[in-house]
Amino acid sequence: WNTVQKLGRALLWVMLLAAWEAAAWGQLRYSVPEEMPKGSFVGDVAKDLGLQVQELSDRGVRP
C-alpha cells in the first residue's frame, strides 16, 4: 500500500498544480499609462473573457 499511497499523493499534487495553472490563465491584465485621459478606452474585457453582451446584461453587469 505504501507505493499506491505515494502514487496517489503524487497524482493529487499534479492535479492541484494543473488546476492552479488553469486558474492563472483565466486572469486578464491591462497596462494603462498614468498619462491617459480619464475615460479612455483600454480594452474589451467582455470580449477578452468570451462573454456575450446579453449574458452580461442578464447577470446585472453595468458599465
Image (tube, rainbow, N blue to C red):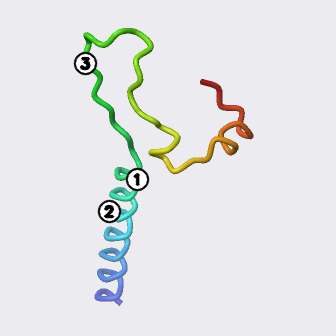
For the residue pair 2 and 56, the one nearer the viewer reads as 56
Q: Which residue in the structure is indicated by mark 1?
A: 23
Q: Residues within 10 Å of mark 2 (few under 14, many from 20)?
A: few
Could you tell me residue 20's position as x and y percent?
36, 56
Residue 12 sits above or below residue 51 on the image: below
Could you tell me residue 34's position as x and y percent?
26, 12
> Spatial distance from mark 2 to mark 3, Cα to Cα?
34 Å
For the residue pair 40 and 5, the one nearer the viewer reads as 40
Q: Tag 3 or tag 1, which sits nearer the N-term?
A: 1
Which residue occupies 47% across, 37% down? 45
For the residue pair 21 and 58, the one nearer the viewer reads as 58
Q: Secondary structure at mark 1?
A: helix
Q: Secondary structure at mark 3?
A: loop
Residue 60 sits above or below residue 26 on the image: above
Q: Amino acid at mark 3?
A: Pro
Q: Which residue in the structure is indicated by mark 2?
A: 17
Q: Residues within 10 Å of mark 3 (few under 14, many from 20)?
A: few
Q: Residues within 10 Å of mark 1 (few under 14, many from 20)?
A: few
Q: Which residue in the structure is indicated by mark 3?
A: 33
> Spatial distance from mark 1 to mark 2, Cα to Cα?
10 Å
Could you tell me residue 13's position as x and y percent?
32, 68
Instruction: Find residue 43 and report its image quarter.
Output: top left
Could you tell me residue 47's position as x and y percent?
49, 44
Q: Tag 3 or tag 2, which sits nearer the N-term?
A: 2
Q: How many marks?
A: 3
Which part of the image, by quadrant, shows the N terminus?
bottom left
